[in-house]
Each structure stands twice: as C-alpha cells, then as structure tokens.
Amino acid sequence: MTHRYALVCSPFVAGVLAYALSPLVARFAIRIGAVDRPGERKIHRHVMPRLGGVGVIVAVAVTLICARMLGNDTWRVPPPVARGLLFGLLPIIAISVIDDIRPVPARVKFLCHLLGGALAVSSGIYLPARIHVLSYEVSIGIAAIPISLVWLAGVTNAFNIIDGLDGLAAGLAFISAVAVGAVFITTGQLNSALLPLTLAGALAGFLPYNMYPARMFLGDTGATAIGFALAVVALKGGQTIPAGFAAATPVLILGLPIADTCVAIVRRTLRRLETRTGGPFQPEIDRATGILRPGQRSAWTVTRRPVVSRGTPSTGGVRSSVSTAMLKRSCAES
C-alpha cells in the first residue's frame, strides 16, 4: 500500500465503518440506558441515544489495524503516540461510558482526565525542554511536563464542553483533524498524518447522524476520546514541525474549543462569586455554544438567554423584548 493510497483509503474505510456502526451503537445505547433526555438546556424533544463516539473509536481502531497489516507494518501510528493513546484513553473512556449511562460528578471526571494525561505524558507525549516561538527559542525546562499535562486535560474537556449543539463538537473535531493531518503532510510526516486523517474520515461518517436534527450524540465517551486524541497528535506534532510554526500550531488548530472553554470557566466562576450558586464545573444555559439555534431557513439566529437571580440580571446579559421578538420571529419563519 503506497503512501497516497493509504492516506486516501484509510479515511474512506473509517467513514464507511462509522456510518455502518452508528445505528448499531444507537440501539445498544438505548438498551443499556445511555440516553440523553429532553430538558431545559436541551433543544431536542425526544430521548436521544448517546455513545455515538464509540462507533467512531471502533472505526478508527479497526482501520488503523488493517492499514498496518496491509502495509506490512510500514503504515502505523508512531509508537509514542500509540502508547500515549492506548494508556491515556483507558481511564477517560471508562469514566465517560459510566457518565453516559448515569451522571458522574464533574470533579471525578476531571481527575480521570488528568490521570489519562499523566499516563500519556509517562508514555512520551510531552513538550521538549526547549520550544520555538516564532523566531525565538524558549527554554521551559521541567515545566514542559505540567504544561503538557494541562494541555491534554484541557483540550479533552474543551471538546466535552462544546458538545452542546447538534454537529458542533463532531464538526469542529473534523476540521481540527483535517488541519492537523494537513500540517503533517506539508512537513513530510506521512505516517503521523494517518491517524488524524483516519479520525476525520470516521467523523465524516458519523456526522450524518449528528447534524441537526440529530439522531444520536457523540456523548461524553466520544467527545472526550476525540478531544484527547487530537490533543495528543497536536502536542506530539508540535515537537517535529518547523520551529517557527511549532508552538502556535496546536493552539491555532484547536483555538475555538479552547477559547470557549476558557470563557465558560471564567463566566461560571464569576457567577459563583455573584450568586453563590453553580461553579466552574457546573453546566449553564447561556454559553457561546448554547445560544446558537440551528435549523432556521436562514442563517443561525443568536439570542440571549440570561440567568436572572433575585430579580437582577446576571453578567450573562439582559433579558430584552428585542431578543425575545427576534426569537419568536425566527421560529415563525422556520
């Protein structure tokens, strides 16, 4: 199998597998109770199966194993990346599957994400002691280890947090995977490009079930596993691409989920200080990814849905008749 065929066939095979497996995973999720029920923070009105990410993970794993076998061990994920993913995903997937069936406290999940990041770091997934920022070389020394750990856990949580709208997390993950793969290809690291491009293919196969109106969700299992995988390949890739591009590449590619996560944590912390309720790990309604409502015939309509405490508008915004009228008008047009 030549380089060209592997980079084209692997995403295609992964996409077909993910598309075929998704209905089976949906039925399995319903059978074990891994479903998302309608609620105040939800835009769906029916019980939705979760665990959609399981089909994506299985499709990627099967495709990579077949590619390695057909390529006579030539086409394989770089060993440090393979070890980091294998060991790091174990606690992350385990706690996420449980959370998809019944809620798990956010702090417990975050500790498992940190554990997964620590296992990946111990497998060789970490920044070098010297990194390049534009044309400057910066020595971070032993701080490379905690920075890498925070990166892995942070990106894992970022994709989990933005998984609030139909197709949002899966779509951003698809774009990020293609971007990471493109960076590897342009720098001649074709083996390293195999994983992100295969992941992109699997996500493309899953997206028809996840676009509005969604028929199933990625779930915590899919969002966290995909986020962790992208964090690993972006971090490992940042060690080997040209110096002037190395430090900025992961942040640029995964910028939106990272920014949304930071804004959400700051907002939740401020709300905790203001109202003495909630906290940085507690969900909310009026996040940047929670106020977009797709499905209208025109472009997405942005409205404000502030949280009011004791009759006073919070920092999330002000309830206004203008935004209410816009929402009613957009719903009427749809």
Image (cartoon, rainbow, N blue to C red):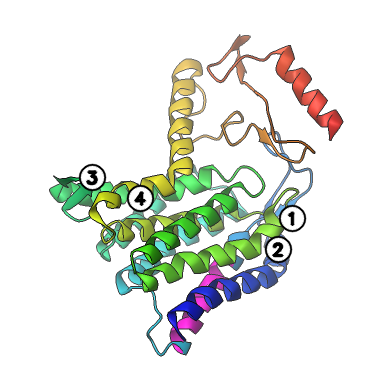
For disc 1, the marked residue is 215
Which residue is painted at 39% across and 55% down in the image? 231
Q: Secondary structure at mark 1?
A: loop
Amino acid carrying label 2: it is Ala
Q: Secondary structure at mark 3?
A: strand
Q: Secondary structure at mark 4?
A: helix
Q: Crowding at label 3, few (<14), some or many (≥20) Cα neighbours within 10 Å? A: some
User: Of marks 4 and 1, which one's residue comes earlier in the chain?
Assistant: 1
- Is disc 2 in contact with disc 3, using a CB cutoff of under 8 Å? no
Check residue 249 in the rendering and tell me which mark sits there, or answer none.
4
In 3D space, how far apart are the residues under numbered discs 3 and 1 (Cα atoms)? 43 Å
Q: Secondary structure at mark 2?
A: helix
Check residue 133 in the rendering and tell me which mark sits there, or answer none.
3
Amino acid carrying label 3: it is Val
Amino acid carrying label 1: it is Arg
Residue 114: where, in percent of width, then height? Answer: 35, 51
User: Of marks 1 and 2, which one's residue comes earlier in the chain?
Assistant: 2
| Span colored in magenta | 56-69
User: Of marks 4 and 2, which one's residue comes earlier in the chain?
Assistant: 2
User: Of marks 3 and 4, which one's residue comes earlier in the chain?
Assistant: 3
Q: Crowding at label 1, few (<14), some or many (≥20) Cα neighbours within 10 Å? A: many
Viewer-nearest residue: 71 or 108: 71
Residue 256: where, in percent of width, then height? Answer: 48, 41
- Is disc 1 in contact with disc 2, using a CB cutoff of under 8 Å? yes
Check residue 26 in the rendering and tell me which mark sits there, or answer none.
2
Characterize the magenta stretch by its predominant secondary structure. Answer: helix
Residue 62: where, in percent of width, then height? Answer: 53, 78
Which residue is painted at 49% across and 74% down in the image? 7
User: Of marks 3 and 1, which one's residue comes earlier in the chain?
Assistant: 3
Residue 208 is one of the magenta-drawn residues: no
In 3D space, how far apart are the residues under numbered discs 3 and 4 (Cα atoms)? 10 Å
Residue 59 is one of the magenta-drawn residues: yes
